[in-house]
Image: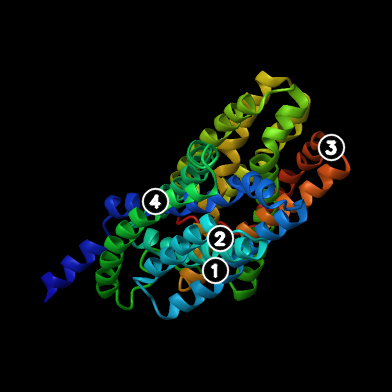
Amino acid sequence: MQATSTHKEAVISKTIFSILFAISFAHLLNDLIQAIIPSVYPILKEKYHLSFSQIGLITFAFQFSASILQPFVGYYTDKHPKPFSQVFGMLFSLSGIVSLSFANSFEWIVLSVMLIGTGSAIFHPESARISNLASGGKRGLAQSIFQVGGNMGTALGPLLVALIVVPHGQAYILWFVIAAVIALGIISKIAFWYRDHLIYRTHKQALFFDLHDLSKLRVKWSIAILLIVIFSKFFYSASLSTYYTFFLMDKFHLSIRQAQFHMFIYLIAYALGTILGGPLGDKFGRKYIIWFSVFGATPFALLLPYVNLFWTDVLMIVIGIIISSAFPAIIVYAQELIPKKLGMISGLFYGFAFGMGALGSALLGILADHTSIQYVYHICSFLPIIGVICYFLPNLKKK
């Protein structure tokens, strides 16, 4: 009996990299499918004579379904873990891809993107839990591996749309069904592991978290501070991910292709920062990584609107690495604050991040229409200063 118990402890305390890389690749495919939506906007706008307001409503419909549902999905799966729920989530995304490839009206397009958003909402909370289960206690590293998959998917989406869909038309969106089918195969394998692992971990939901002695009020204030930090980070990130190519074209008179090359430099730096953020949080304490990754980007963000193209690339590499290191640390820190509600917390923070990214893109677009894209970058350069609020976070690093 003792030997069996020891074996179980060994199984659940080991870092299982095969599962971590598998869920990361599934994250890549999930976010690749999501990235199709904004990438095909020019095709849909021209083909169906959509206004910018309608494009904004399509974005809102996708982000609303992807963000609002996530905390509720997480809350439910905290109480009733569903190892195969991600399979159903990916089926929603697959049906959304098929629907979008045939959609011939504004209403049909909205329905299609909401199906993809619903699939994403089901995917993220349970994936964050699986990442923790497979971490073997290396929570930051596990979250970074998971996050970098999503970042790579977001970067690859526009490239594949440019190669496959743009030359041939909307119907070629169907080719992305291949990504969904591959994801279904990977997620199904993970689901069986997840089911067996839950049996091992009965009544051990907080195994990989050190219990803290913070009051409920202190925990609530800490969660509020983290949400403010996410507001700062994702509003600023929205200015980079959505409008950076327009900024380069406007300020330095680059072609679309040249601007996309410089955008790729930023995306690679962003992925690198994601990889570094989790392990550094494990080593030095997540509070300090969160503080540095948001507030630490301030001097570089303030300089960005005033430098030439070469130094713009240099600053974007530094900003990308610094600011992207925050999110893995934020997710794990929030999970440590409320360790018995991993799904709900993951859903809340992923959903809030989605929502802030959507809101930021919309509001900054309106501001750019009324002023200029360079003015937007002058205003956004002050956003990382909000990160100074991280000073008030309690330090949860194990002593």
* Residue at the image position 54 percent from the left and 68 percent from the top: 70
- Helix, strand or loop for disc 3: loop
Label 4, label 1: how far apart the Cα atoms are: 22 Å
Q: Which mark is residue 179?
A: 4
Task: Give the Cα distance between marks 3 and 4.
Answer: 38 Å
Depth check, front residue: 46 or 375: 46
- In the rendered structure, which disc, 2 or 3, sits on the residue that comes first in sequence? 2
Q: Residue at x 23, y 66 (%)?
A: 9
Residue 317 in percent (x, y) is at: 58, 30
Residue 244 position, x and y percent, is 68, 36
Numbered disc in front, either 2 or 4: 4
Q: Secondary structure at mark 2?
A: helix
Q: Is residue 107 toward the left or the right of residue 33 in the image?
A: right
Sequence order check: which comes first, mark 4 or mark 1? 1
Measured in 3D between alpha carbons, the distance from the residue under mark 2 to the one under mark 3, in whole angstroms, is 30 Å
Q: To which residue does mark 1 refer? A: 70
Q: Amino acid at mark 1?
A: Gln
Q: State which quarter of the image contains the C terminus.
A: bottom left
Q: Check disc 2 and report the residue beneath it.
A: 350
Q: How is the image coloured?
A: rainbow
Residue drawn at 33 percent across, 49 percent down: 21
| Three-letter code for the amino acid on which mark 3 is drawn | Ser
Tell me whether the residue at label 2 lies in contact with that at label 1, contact meaning CB atoms closer than 8 angstroms: yes
**Quarter of the image with the N terminus in it:** bottom left
Q: Which residue is mark 3?
A: 372
Which of the 4 quarters of the picture holds residue 203?
bottom left
Residue 248 percent across, percent down from the top left: 71, 28
Quadrant for residue 139, please give it: bottom left
